[in-house]
Amino acid sequence: MWSSRRPTSFPGLGILIGGLSSSVTQAAWAGEPKLDPPNFVFSSFSQGTGIMGDGQWDIEGNLYGMTARSSGLDVPASSGGGVPSAQVSVRRQVSGVTGLDFGLAAGGSYLSQGTTSGEVPSRGLSTFFTAHYAGKISEALGAGVYGQFGGTAQQSGHDSWIETSTAAITPVLAWEPEGGFLASIALNPVVASYAAKGALSQGPTLRNLVGVGVSFGIGVNMNDQLVLAPEISWVGSHGSALESGAQSARSDTYRIGLTGTFSYRGSQPGAPTQSVSVGMWYFEEDGLVFGPASPAAASGGFRTRGALLGITFGARRSVPSL
């Protein structure tokens, strides 16, 4: 039986999260080839054009930790947290088609939330395909779109696993000048995600959970290897009742944060550019649960506030055409 306070979960995290890629292309030291950092698709919530070179591969690994405080729905406030996303992904540029790449990502999550009956864990698994196309409108201005399609499975407590299909689309409009202090200004209008079944941070399991939002980020070249990127984002979500007579819900989620990406090249000749990114965000979700209330399923308003910390490792490799 579902309770009004469930493990804090953001099923759209792996879908909605994007990456403001580093624009560092200068030499790390004199005489060395220019750095060509990977496009980190899952290191932040804002997204640049991320155009890869012909035949290149990007490899990315992400680990996120979260702590959150939940209140509302007629139950005492409680704390929770855990790992909302641990993920590995790989993408390859399609040879001969500039700006087009395809990839695959897989990951998992583990969260716990305090309830009136004790700690309740939540586990998740996800696998999805990625597709991305972008191009230059002018020397510095670019546009593109990212798509993700796949499935997730989630278990709360000792309940059965809930499997569902997911999809997301992220349009990009970005100003990315070559060199200088400014690395990028990226706007992602009408970011959208869909899950056939899912849940907000609190409330019931929902049907046709849709999220629509916008994100904005600015990348600043601190030196030849380090980019700092403050960003903000908003997502509005709504889900329908899972069955007749059940509850529906909606929410608004706000995030503000900062990421730092450091890129470097190995000491061996021809070594690929490698990058590590660290980010921290504050988030707040304000929501409403509609429909008939019961002792185990309250209706009304809720709020979840917390902090998210993430680290990403990756590399860009050039290989012969397949």
Image (tube, rainbow, N blue to C red):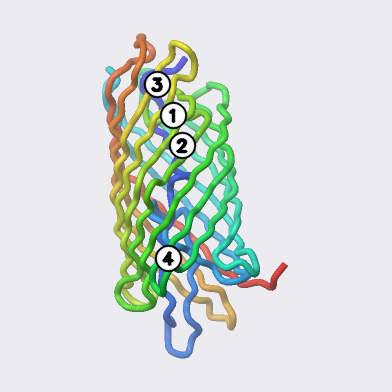
Residue type at numbered disc 4: Gly
- Contact between labelled residues 1 and 3, with CB atoms less than 8 Å apart: no
The residue labelled by disc 3 is 248
Q: Residue at x 35, y 28 (%)?
A: 250
Quadrant the C terminus occupies: bottom right
Residue extending furthest right? 322
Say which label, 3 or 4, has the lower sequence index: 4
Mark pair 4, 2: CA separation = 30 Å
Q: Tell me the mark number nearer the camera, choosing from 3 and 1.
A: 3
CB atoms of marks 1 and 2 within 8 Å:
yes
Mark 2 is surrounded, within 10 Å at the Cα level, by few (under 14), some (14 to 19) or many (20 or more) other residues, namely many
Q: Residues within 10 Å of mark 4 (few under 14, many from 20)?
A: many
* Residue in the image at 43% along x and 68% along y: 137
Q: Nearer the viewer, mark 3 or mark 4?
A: 4
Q: Earlier in the sequence, mark 3 or mark 1?
A: 1
* Mark carried by residue 142: 4
Mark nearer the N terminus (3 vs 2): 2
> Badge 1 is on which residue?
199
In the shown orientation, is residue 252 left or right of residue 128? left
Q: Earlier in the sequence, mark 4 or mark 1?
A: 4
Q: Residues within 10 Å of mark 3 (few under 14, many from 20)?
A: many
The residue that mark 2 highlights is 11
